[in-house]
Image (cartoon, helix red, strand yellow):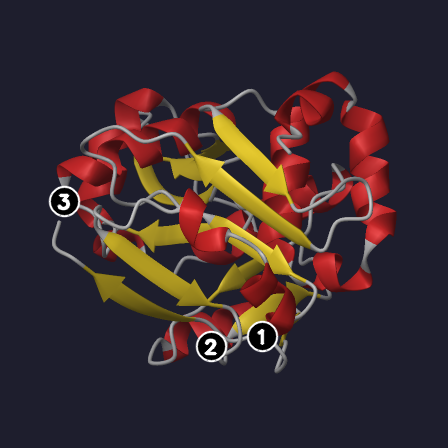
Amino acid sequence: ETILNKIRNNFCKIEKYIARASTRLRLFSQVYGFLVLRNRVQSEPVTVLVDKWPKFRVIVCKPSYEKSDVFKDILIFASDVTILEETRIPSVIEWSRYLCIGNALFFPFFLHCALLFHSSGFSSGFSLSSLSESHLDLVNQTWKFGKHPGTLGMIRDMIAHFPSRCVLDPEGRPVSWILTYAYCAMGMLYTLPEHRGRGYAKALIGSMARTLKAQGYPVFCFVEEENAVSYQLFTSMGFTEDPSHRQVWFGFNNF
């Protein structure tokens, strides 16, 4: 059953239902964040599928694809593993495409926000703002997984529709920035090397966290296991590791 129209036509009702429906769904913040964000933001078309409604056990969030898209996520929530075996999940996945399967059980740095630090002061002429499409190439070229034609559309959609923050220099050029993924996690945090050590990243995280929290979104991020600098940064700001959530990715087929 497709519930996309129900979500679009009953934003507040469906969001309140999702918030109450399942503690496990709220703990699985990727799916919860995706649904809440899509309830409020008109972005690229997506299909939301459930095994039954309203007492669902499985939710599948499936984006639309173009030929060059390789970084769009199909998000799946299930109340337990046996239910996945009973449903027809494989039938909604395009197995001939490049495929990267993520398991939300095995990544040690899934973080929740506990405290929200204030933004630090900036040097004269520097200001806090949001990203625009004119900054698309800069973000794509500096992202670890960027520099690929398939990432441009995803980043463009993130900048156009989801919350972002950046620090602009006196000429209006971004020197530090953070974005929001389609499933509501903060990410792509980056500061140009010559502007590091000035507290910009901490200011951006604090501003973004306050915005997400004030609007009722889940506040969380993922940190790679080897990224000790980011882990220390987020934990120093009051984020806490959730040991029950970990994330690993398995790639299939070629780009």
**Could you tell me the amino acid type at mark 3?**
Lys
Q: Are marks 2 and 1 in contact (CB under 8 Å)?
A: yes
Instruction: Tell us which disc is closer to us: 3 or 2.
Output: 2
Ranked by sequence position, the earlier of labels 1 and 3 is: 3
Q: CA distance from mark 1 to mark 3?
A: 29 Å
Label 2 residue SS: loop
Q: Earlier in the sequence, mark 3 or mark 2?
A: 2
| Residue 164 location (% of width, % of height) | 49, 36
Closer to the camera: disc 1 or disc 3?
Answer: 1
For mark 3, what is the residue? 147
Label 3 environment density (alpha carbons within 10 Å; few <14, some 14–19, many ≥20): some
Dot 1 and dot 3 residues touching (CB under 8 Å): no
Residue at (44%, 69%) from the top-left corner? 223
* Left or right relative to 98: residue 29: right
Q: Which residue is mark 2?
A: 107
Residue carrying label 1: 245
Q: CA distance from mark 2 to mark 1?
A: 6 Å
Q: In the shown orientation, is residue 25 left or right of residue 132? A: right
